[in-house]
Amino acid sequence: GDFARLDTGRQRRTGVPEVVFAEGKTPEQTLRLLAELRDRAPETPALATRCPQEVLAAAPDAFPGQPVLVDPVARTVTVGDPPAEHGSVSVLTAGTSDLPVARECVAALSAWGVRTRLLDDVGVAGLPRLLEHLADIRDADCVIVVAGMDGALPSVVTGLVPAPVVGVPTSVGYGFADGGRAAAASMLSSCAPGLTVVNIDNGFGAAAHAAKIVRRMHGG
Amino acid sequence: GDFARLDTGRQRRTGVPEVVFAEGKTPEQTLRLLAELRDRAPETPALATRCPQEVLAAAPDAFPGQPVLVDPVARTVTVGDPPAEHGSVSVLTAGTSDLPVARECVAALSAWGVRTRLLDDVGVAGLPRLLEHLADIRDADCVIVVAGMDGALPSVVTGLVPAPVVGVPTSVGYGFADGGRAAAASMLSSCAPGLTVVNIDNGFGAAAHAAKIVRRMHGG
Amino acid sequence: GDFARLDTGRQRRTGVPEVVFAEGKTPEQTLRLLAELRDRAPETPALATRCPQEVLAAAPDAFPGQPVLVDPVARTVTVGDPPAEHGSVSVLTAGTSDLPVARECVAALSAWGVRTRLLDDVGVAGLPRLLEHLADIRDADCVIVVAGMDGALPSVVTGLVPAPVVGVPTSVGYGFADGGRAAAASMLSSCAPGLTVVNIDNGFGAAAHAAKIVRRMHGG
Amino acid sequence: GDFARLDTGRQRRTGVPEVVFAEGKTPEQTLRLLAELRDRAPETPALATRCPQEVLAAAPDAFPGQPVLVDPVARTVTVGDPPAEHGSVSVLTAGTSDLPVARECVAALSAWGVRTRLLDDVGVAGLPRLLEHLADIRDADCVIVVAGMDGALPSVVTGLVPAPVVGVPTSVGYGFADGGRAAAASMLSSCAPGLTVVNIDNGFGAAAHAAKIVRRMHGG
Amino acid sequence: GDFARLDTGRQRRTGVPEVVFAEGKTPEQTLRLLAELRDRAPETPALATRCPQEVLAAAPDAFPGQPVLVDPVARTVTVGDPPAEHGSVSVLTAGTSDLPVARECVAALSAWGVRTRLLDDVGVAGLPRLLEHLADIRDADCVIVVAGMDGALPSVVTGLVPAPVVGVPTSVGYGFADGGRAAAASMLSSCAPGLTVVNIDNGFGAAAHAAKIVRRMHGG
Amino acid sequence: GDFARLDTGRQRRTGVPEVVFAEGKTPEQTLRLLAELRDRAPETPALATRCPQEVLAAAPDAFPGQPVLVDPVARTVTVGDPPAEHGSVSVLTAGTSDLPVARECVAALSAWGVRTRLLDDVGVAGLPRLLEHLADIRDADCVIVVAGMDGALPSVVTGLVPAPVVGVPTSVGYGFADGGRAAAASMLSSCAPGLTVVNIDNGFGAAAHAAKIVRRMHGG
Amino acid sequence: GDFARLDTGRQRRTGVPEVVFAEGKTPEQTLRLLAELRDRAPETPALATRCPQEVLAAAPDAFPGQPVLVDPVARTVTVGDPPAEHGSVSVLTAGTSDLPVARECVAALSAWGVRTRLLDDVGVAGLPRLLEHLADIRDADCVIVVAGMDGALPSVVTGLVPAPVVGVPTSVGYGFADGGRAAAASMLSSCAPGLTVVNIDNGFGAAAHAAKIVRRMHGG
Amino acid sequence: GDFARLDTGRQRRTGVPEVVFAEGKTPEQTLRLLAELRDRAPETPALATRCPQEVLAAAPDAFPGQPVLVDPVARTVTVGDPPAEHGSVSVLTAGTSDLPVARECVAALSAWGVRTRLLDDVGVAGLPRLLEHLADIRDADCVIVVAGMDGALPSVVTGLVPAPVVGVPTSVGYGFADGGRAAAASMLSSCAPGLTVVNIDNGFGAAAHAAKIVRRMHGG
Ligand SMILES: Nc1ncnc2c1ncn2[C@@H]1O[C@H](COP(=O)(O)O)[C@@H](O)[C@H]1O
Ligand SMILES: Nc1ncnc2c1ncn2[C@@H]1O[C@H](COP(=O)(O)O)[C@@H](O)[C@H]1O
Ligand SMILES: Nc1ncnc2c1ncn2[C@@H]1O[C@H](COP(=O)(O)O)[C@@H](O)[C@H]1O
Ligand SMILES: Nc1ncnc2c1ncn2[C@@H]1O[C@H](COP(=O)(O)O)[C@@H](O)[C@H]1O
Ligand SMILES: [Mg+2]
Ligand SMILES: [Mg+2]
Ligand SMILES: [Mg+2]
Ligand SMILES: [Mg+2]
Ligand SMILES: [Mg+2]
Ligand SMILES: [Mg+2]
Ligand SMILES: [Mg+2]
Ligand SMILES: [Mg+2]
């Protein structure tokens, strides 16, 4: 686009492709950039994150003859068929309000052909819910744990599984939760070794890290 | 003392007596205030917290003919015999470095005649350690959970026991732990309802709250 | 609900039941979760907090044949009859703007069968208002003090009564009040021993702590 | 001095004279500046604040033939006779640890000929101590209230007396007290109208404001 | 009102009367409280600050037969005749956007019978504008300086005039101005002795302090 | 130890063993815990991090008959032979002062048998230094980038290599660097997708994450 | 204007003229001030920044017979012909969302007759984009680098070019980006010597600094 | 050195040479790096900043046959003869405690052959001191203003002179001065257009910016 300089060498250099961040762009700009990405980098689907309602509504008709996937909870649009599935990433949430961030994570991994399993609403206020499902998580290539408020769940999970774990703090909560800063600080100060952290609400960033791990293991 | 105005009506008004906070006082001032408290409020032991090395060393000989208890880990001095034991408060720590704060808590409760049980080093990085001892905690009148770094343990405990729980954030940790602010913010934003919080490293304050609960239940 | 994993074991484990936090949920989701709670945990009323206008308006007709209590100031909905009243909790506010938080507190305690007394607008700018009513507070099982701005009232009250006191900072005020952080920091740094604190505007959390104290004393 | 540019016009322009702030200066520099002030502005005593031990010890012999007043608690040195006493300022402290700040305040006012009354250790944890002495404060030209930790005392006092009140937050306390920021934020957010605030531990600044009020009323 | 506990003893105790803070109240509540204040404390005008548009529009007709003064810039309503003018307070602003805060200050002082002079838009980016008018300020009983952004003007003024100075930081500015915190921190750290500070945008609080100074000098 | 509860199940549960964090422990405690770890978990070397000078000096003689490795820059002690080398992790630093953190990282990985390459002092102030060595980094299983001050290097590297990247902010710098918070915030806000972050100065944590990635790929 | 005190001596004193900051002003006020500036300082164009939609729409017809330039991305209005072009300033952006700030910068420089070159979307996630265009930047009189999120680009550029560099942090980003504070802190802590910084989103301020450099070199 | 990677291309790329930052280095490392710089970049003097006492004492004898300049206030060592003087930079300080930062600035500029004028202790508490010397500043190529506490002086100066101005906040002050953050925030929010800012206490960084301006004007 004449208002942007798409970094089409990114997939080759880093293993994950350029993606359209729709926040702060007009619907027209987002759709035009998706089309341009599709043209210039046809080997992976074109993905847009943080899409406003207009983009989610207009996308299905905007790419005639091409598969378009819209996730209104994640607020993502994917244009083009994803590569064959490979690897395995588990995505957990602490509460129901963390779901949109987890779904952005799943949408990006799916666009890049990475297999995901989502386990939601297993926060520490009701620990038995997590312990019941622990076996399902232990064999993942990477575990992503999404949590707001106290941000305690990623520390608990990192102490229980052998996979590399990425914590995603969310802006869920009020007062001292401070838009996700309390959750982030708790994760960054975790007593459980090996937990790494991405920005608040950045499901996309966690997905990119996980995809690089999976790609290194399984290629793709 | 001529440099202080001891609040000897405090026990009658609030149920917990005036206590000497030794930080920022000379050893002489602390010992003189302990003696004055002993004189003017002989019905409970006189307690000093945050005592420097000199006070801990000098205390045993400073009150001839009176029982003196010194806890060098808690940095407390207790002069006088505590009342008969009553009630039951459990004190937990996440890591070994949280012990001084937990011991200050135990020292105050003991001086006031409240029975305590201390369970240490059961942080969430190794959750099985907590789950093994859960039964011992469930029947307490109040549970005090002392934790630094991520501050996750009090949320986990509050989701598992029926007793009122007080979280004590500690200044253990570095970087984002921020002198205990991360732990405190995590506890204050807890997804587990009913967790209340005191100031960072304030084992004494948690003890006072627990003592008021115990006193209301069992008198004393 | 298929979008949530209700923690119906919570009352048994912790003494306070799962509650619907309506913030960030659609009205339909909140009403469906209230119905599900009512079905699966019929022994206590189902409670929803932080309800938007639509939920408050729709609730009375949504549960035919069941008692529904709506408090538009507290923004709570209670479905089902509360257990017989027991215990005694005093709830104080510093100013008239703190009322919604105090009423959320009262609504939760009432749903759980705990007797409450509300004393409002007795902040420290006009201290005689508090001193006049002090006798009414002294015999409570727990005192909850709700205050924004300077957050000074809980410290004053904790220095005057024998009951355990919980401070609830509110987001009332501007500038250095900082959305309740000034009040919270003042309470957490209180010179009055035994004051514990919950998150900003978290009347519900203070109610849960008080209910656990009352339950321990009086059962229920 | 060749390393400083003394503002000897300050008394004429603003009513309070230039003063030596000894922090970060060598003892020699402080003593030389005191001498220079004495020479060039002989109409008021020369005052140095925040003096290290060496200056306090050396001062009495450093100005032969001149009256030298050293206050080791305030850490001030005053050289020269103060003008005749006039006006009346009350200085209160919440706790014994706030005393050095209050004494700096008193030392400055005394050097400038303002009459002071000091009432210490009357913090809100033991409110009866303040109420007993209220009558003594009501007729002051200005009331200065020095408090750390919760910073609640200045709000309580401002709600009870007709004099203009200045709050001085102190760095007394730990954790959320945050070096005096909690006390300052509480005072700045006070629900009691008319309370003004100076920097943390700045007893000198409060004295300067009070002196300007007194000077405007009584001249001098 | 049944939803508020008016502190009608405040004028007698503190010299400034109770005032209605309209923020967070419905227009009906504000008008009812103004009427109640008028009834119960007829000796001074009843004042409401931070009034929304509806109150400003409805006020002139709401008090038949009584003088009503509305200032739409200050967002204040004054009902009743002010006492005879006395004293003299200068109010300065740094930029045009600081005007509403300065006008709130003037409205309160006028309601209480204190004479004011307003000098606006004399910020330090164009220092000659201040120097030209300095003579007008020097003889005031109190000078109030209102400034956002860098908050530099109060320090400059305090270094030039003998009157006691109160700084009012405003929320004017962006980025590091941080809603007025930069201006406030600059004023609180002022190198000019005697500057005291009130909360961000708190023109009313500065007026109360000035009124107490004036009242002490001139009675009233 | 009687003062600690070693989590010897950690390696089995999470893939990385319990490690002794020497900060805040006496030299005796650290050496005793190393011995206990050695006894109870002989399959991997026992590691202590953040060791004070006394531990570094005493360690070589404290474990007779066992290989002891001391790194005085990293402040680590390793007792026992590491497993056979596998995998490949690159560790970069921005400046020479970041070296201790990078060396802690290398020491932990080496103890766990992971091969490392260290490339130091390649910060963005002199970008050509990084570009020259880029080829060496591209084929790593994981890249760890250690940087203080502006924290810009991890973003630059993440935009250039396909490996998963972990950023370690360090406390190097002053003023706005704020003990590593500026570097951390820059990394967490990175425009380069997939960068994850650990706590300030937490070389050990980054090593644990990398080890889990390597272990998942290569076993061990 | 009667509501403002235009500083028409500013150009003479400082080399850059007074400018209308439209934020917080009514459209009428902004247009009237533009007209007044035009009248009283006809030697340079009159400029308004941060104009709301109404001003941008009304401006072209508001100054009949005069050249009016509106930039809707920059939100600026320029009335009058700029002086002849001189000097040379390069303006870079990290991402497409930083464009409005860069365009404000260009609009101001253009109004003052300074030649500019804009190079956008060359952030560090795709470093090759910058390296390709480096030669174009090296000979500028001043380079202005606009960046949000990680704020890394200005440090990289300062390490590569001989011109004085000014960094402009922007409020682009979320979570730890913190409204531009992360970018600003990264720039202020830069390891690249000579980078200076202006307030978040303050393209205008960077332009003023650059214009002063150009004016000193080339006059004008 | 084997522990550092000197960036000897920096002068050619950016116009200012690599410099040794001695903080956090051993005296031996600093002296060795100075020697290495001298060898590999003989065209400019080698400079070390933030030198501890040992380096300042050892330097004169460490470079036999070479001119060595030690400034104990600036804590700098310069080895080698500076180029011929050119350009003109004014350096101002607000108070005497800001002198070390200003002297670091002067030392760097002198090493690079830039002529400087130092005007100290002209802070806004005594404005007449600045106004007296204004003429001396007006014709500089660049003005550097060093100020702690309120940070007001750079805003005042920027409103009075045509030269580009760089503000250097210092860590002088206490409480809200917050290690220089208050001064920095005030400067960054300045109402005086064109003021740019460097990190707290970073006299060296301001010198580098000024040197680049001078070099662009006068070559060198
Ligand atoms: N949800 C997201 N959060 C953070 N970064 C994103 C997200 N989605 C896309 N991005 C990145 O943001 C960049 C787009 O920036 P821009 O030049 O402003 O369009 C892309 O290079 C993406 O890698
Ligand atoms: N007002 C409230 N403040 C804080 N937590 C609440 C509140 N009301 C309900 N909760 C808790 O929030 C949880 C609901 O979280 P969720 O899974 O997001 O619906 C419940 O388990 C409640 O215990
Ligand atoms: N304790 C104090 N706190 C704040 N400012 C002070 C104090 N003592 C003296 N001052 C002021 O600090 C200035 C001295 O600054 P300096 O030029 O660094 O010596 C004088 O103008 C005093 O007005
Ligand atoms: N975009 C901008 N950011 C910061 N300051 C500005 C901007 N545009 C204009 N100004 C300055 O803001 C001042 C206007 O302030 P005021 O008196 O409130 O109109 C002018 O003196 C300008 O120099
Ligand atoms: Mg849930
Ligand atoms: Mg442990
Ligand atoms: Mg009220
Ligand atoms: Mg006391
Ligand atoms: Mg103006
Ligand atoms: Mg280097
Ligand atoms: Mg881009
Ligand atoms: Mg001075």
Image: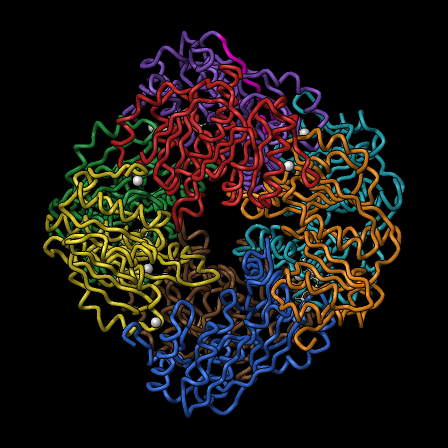
Chain colours: A green, B red, C purple, D orange, E cyan, F yellow, G brown, H blue
Tell which of E64 and A103 is nearer to you.
A103
Q: Quadrant of residue A97?
A: top left
Q: Position of residue D79 (x, y in %)?
A: 78, 63
Q: Residue at x 30, y 74 (%)?
A: H5
Q: Quadrant of the N terminus of chain H?
A: bottom left
Q: Position of residue D31 (x, y in %)?
A: 70, 68
Residue D208 colored magenta?
Answer: no
Q: Is residue B13 left or right of residue B214?
A: right
Residue G33 to residue E56: above or below: below
Q: Residue at x 14, y 49 (%)?
A: F215
Tell which of E6 and D9 is nearer to you.
D9
User: Is residue G82 visible from the viewing direction of this image?
Assistant: no
User: Is residue E130 visible from the viewing direction of this image?
Assistant: yes
Residue E191 to residue B77: above or below: below
Residue C93 colored magenta?
Answer: yes
Q: Quadrant of residue C44?
A: top left
Q: Residue furthest front?
A: B65
Q: Quadrant of the C terminus of chain H?
A: bottom left
Callout count: 0
Tell which of B131 and G50 is nearer to you.
B131
Q: What range of the chain is rendered magenta?
A: C85-105
The image quadrant where one finds ligand 5 is top left
Residue C18 to residue D158: above or below: above
Tell which of D118 and F105 is nearer to you.
D118
Q: Position of residue H142 (x, y in %)?
A: 56, 78
Q: Position of residue A27 (x, y in %)?
A: 35, 49
